[in-house]
Amino acid sequence: MVKKHLENDKKTDRCQQNSSDKVNKNDVLEAALAYKKLGFSIIPLKEKGKTPLIKSWRPFQKKPASEEQIHKWWNAHPRANIGIICGKVSGLVVLDADSKKARSFIKKNGFKRTPVSATAKGRHIYFKHPGERVRNKVGSELGLDIRADGGYVVAPPSIHPNGKEYKWLLSPWNQCLADLPSWVKELSNDKSTAKLKEHNNRKGWVELALSGVKKG
């Protein structure tokens, strides 16, 4: 039901559709190549895991892998999960929310409509990178991590170690990336969460995006 509301809302500003819309995104290699076409820097992760399969993914924080390299990776490891490197190289900052505390905090601050994926325990919320460096911040007491420069996320249709599949609720093929909210920038700079201003929740959009986020 959540996916239906997110995907079918006619008021949503859509990205221009391209050939990637016709890709079978349940096929891991095809999905990896489709992400590449969106400009995302891709790396292979262990099957049903979150650890990179390659010795060093640092070079791909500066320059995305070629289609040829992506083919080589998944031809050798056809069941590898997909990692999307965040930061300036992909033009991405991703909020990783996996607790009720994180959901409550996000609701209070709000954000514009943007791509969202379901993880095993929560949500990945994708935003446009602002251009200047955004710190990668993990281990927050809120259960809210910021995956930015120096970080990466596991992308659909990867499989979590517990067997659950990562899925798009609103995909980057159907929704443009929203600008990074100012409160996320403040949080990445270690500003006290108590001092962050609350912003308007846009007609229940945030509730739809975060519906079903489980504790812990």
Image: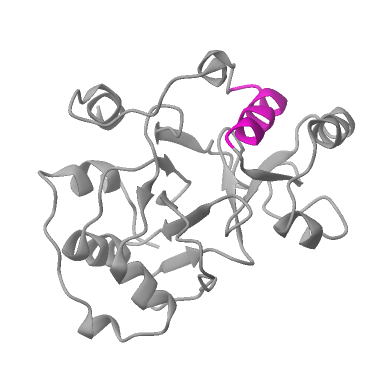
Q: Is residue 126 left or right of residue 104?
A: right
Q: Where is residue 38 in the image (x, y as percent from the top left)?
A: 57, 34
Residue 31 magenta-drawn? yes
Q: Nearer the viewer, residue 209 or 199?
A: 199
Please tell me which residue is depicted at 26% across the width and 62% down the height of the picture.
106
Magenta part mainly helix, strand or loop? helix
Q: Nearer the viewer, residue 59 or 23?
A: 59
Residue 155 magenta-drawn? no
Q: Where is residue 17 in the image (x, y as percent from the top left)?
A: 44, 20
Question: Is 213 rendered above or below residue 22?
Answer: below
Q: Is residue 58 left or right of residue 100?
A: right
Question: Is 189 rendered above or below residue 64?
Answer: below
Q: Is residue 37 left or right of residue 53?
A: left
Span highlighted in magenta in the image: 26-38
Q: Where is residue 160 in the image (x, y as percent from the top left)?
A: 59, 44
Residue sitting at the far front? 131
The quarter holding residue 144 reads: bottom left
Q: Which of 124 and 215 is in front in this view?
A: 124
The quarter holding residue 151 reads: bottom right
Is the N terminus in the top left, top right, bottom left or bottom right quadrant? top left
Please tell me which residue is depicted at 75% across the width and 32% down the height of the picture.
79
Q: Where is residue 165 in the image (x, y as percent from the top left)?
A: 54, 35
Residue sitting at the far top? 22
Question: Is 113 rendered above or below residue 104?
Answer: above
